[in-house]
Amino acid sequence: MSREAPAALLAREVVTELVRGGVRHVVLSPGSRSAPLAYALLAAHDAGWLRLHVRVDERVAGFVALGLARADGAPAAVVTTSGTAVANLHPAVLEAAHSGVPVVVLSADRPHELRRTGANQTTEQVGIFAAAPRWEADVPADTPPGAIRQVVVRALAAATGARSGDPGPVHLNLSFRDPLVPTHPWDPGAAPGRRDVVAWRGPGGVVDVPAGGRTVVVAGDGAGAVAARLAEEGGWPLLAEPTSGARTGPNAVSAYRLLLAELGDEVERVVVVGHPTLSRPVSSLLARPDLDVVVLAPTGAVWPDVAGTAGRVAGAVRVVPGADDAGWLARWRRAGSAAAAVLDAHAGLDGLTVARAVADAAATDGQPGVLVLGSSMTVRDMDLAAALPTGLRLVANRGLAGIDGTLSTATGLALATGGPARAVVGDLTFLHDAGALLRGELEEEVDLQVVVLNDRGGSIFATLEHGAPERAATFERVFGTPQAVDVAALSAAYGARHTLVRSEEDLAAVLAAPVSGRSVVEVLLDRSRVREQRAQLSEQVTEAVRRALA
């Protein structure tokens, strides 16, 4: 009987050790050099070891893996062939690096003797992601099985942060020599037992912060329930971004970014949890040199302190007795209630009302409902929602706050959780990742509804300095970037159902239906007055807050 091809043996050992280390999902983009992994992964999928997902676009595949890993924090892998295929993963790798998501990149490569020889689809793949991976290895084609076990276990320990407390992407560059087709079929048999690396024992030092005082808790992306707990223990207002997972409880303040103009100067201390990046008023607050800034950073070598004002950075914050200042929290609550009343009364079909309606609908989908937000205007619209419904998990790629890969991330979350999931995005975010709607005929369907706020361009820029009236002559060409894509035809081309929404009544009807399969809900909006309308709304909130605080 002929011996098995070394490439096939190497691939099978890699797959076995990935499963042993807790990988349950692998996304594959097809290619020839990665063929040994493709054969091994399909056999493992058929044996029930893992779930294999195939995507033809590597950038989509990378973000699908990101969404799979975000679902529960378990590492997910993505496999590509050599050459430009690997480079297409870079955006997802960067997002994973900055948001601490355990994505395992498996790139196939030529053996070492063919590198730098002009061989087809051969480039310098080692180090291609620069400093983004938490760990990487270049695996030669003749690596023995025992060494592969060491490489994979260390890669997974780095990806999950088991020893470092700093999860993120890792990169294994795997060399395969011809023949790339296995000589014999692989019957994996029973799944291998788990191999666990002893967990990191962190966090670091504990900082004591006295209760009371003119303190606020700023909860950024991924802050989690600890932010709400600290706010309640200290009697402090909670300024929580929508994807913080912390906007809950009696101390959460609505429309906080609009309140800072009236109350921000009174703040004396800020406790920062998570990764706050959403609001310029919050960034301005954190840049004040006179503040006592305490940053809670239980993991990672990098912590949020853009302005360099943090006086204390620690793994945990402990609230200790301090001066009672119930009036401070009461003022923020009154201001927040006044702002919420204005926002709740806001009607008409626009980004704010759509965000609120989609959030309410997603909260009824399951426990928890999953809603993915585009990282441009939509996440900021959701930030102004007076209250977020319970039973809802809000996700956005806020590590680098890019608009790329949003639909792919939502797809990964839907695959991992079993769905349904919803996403709400602007038209440019949708077009940037429309390829994520493509489903191969042999791939499992996902229950994903994508709500597209189509105002035919980049409305967020209209609310920034670029959209000022004196810059109108240049705005449309280089910032507004108007487009007239037929979203219905594009959706149909990818096999997704399309519904056009022109009114709040239309929107309510389509959101009330169960999410089934891939669908696109196109909401037509007019961005010509968005700057003026947002300024008017802000003025209304400010007037209401001033009356409440008088």
Image (tube, rainbow, N blue to C red):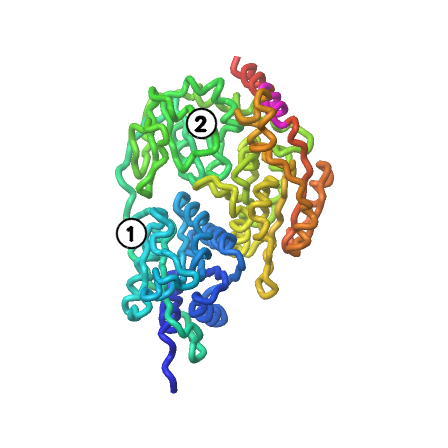
Q: Secondary structure at mark 2?
A: helix
Q: Secondary structure at mark 1?
A: loop
What amino acid is found at the position of numbered circle 2 in the picture? Val
Image vertical order of residue 113 relative to residue 293, above or below: below
Q: Which mark is residue 163?
A: 1
Sequence-first tag of 2 and 1: 1
- Please provide percent x and percent y for residue 276: 43, 34
Q: Which mark is residue 282?
A: 2
State the extent of the magenta-drawn residues as a range: 530-539
Residue that sits furthest to the left in the current view: 205
Judge from the rendering whether residue 528 lies leftward or rightward of residue 120; answer left or right: right
| Front residue of this view, candidates 335 and 371 | 371
Cβ atoms at labels 2 and 1 below 8 Å apart: no
- Please provide percent x and percent y for residue 249: 49, 34
Residue that sits furthest to the front in the current view: 118
Neighbour tally class for label 2: few under 14, some 14-19, many 20 plus, Cα within 10 Å: some
Image vertical order of residue 37 relative to residue 415, above or below: below
| Front residue of this view, candidates 515 and 34 | 34
Image vertical order of residue 320 relative to residue 486, above or below: above
Judge from the rendering whether residue 135 lies leftward or rightward of residue 64; answer left or right: left
Residue 535 is one of the magenta-drawn residues: yes
What amino acid is found at the position of numbered circle 1 in the picture? Arg
Q: Is residue 207 visible?
A: yes
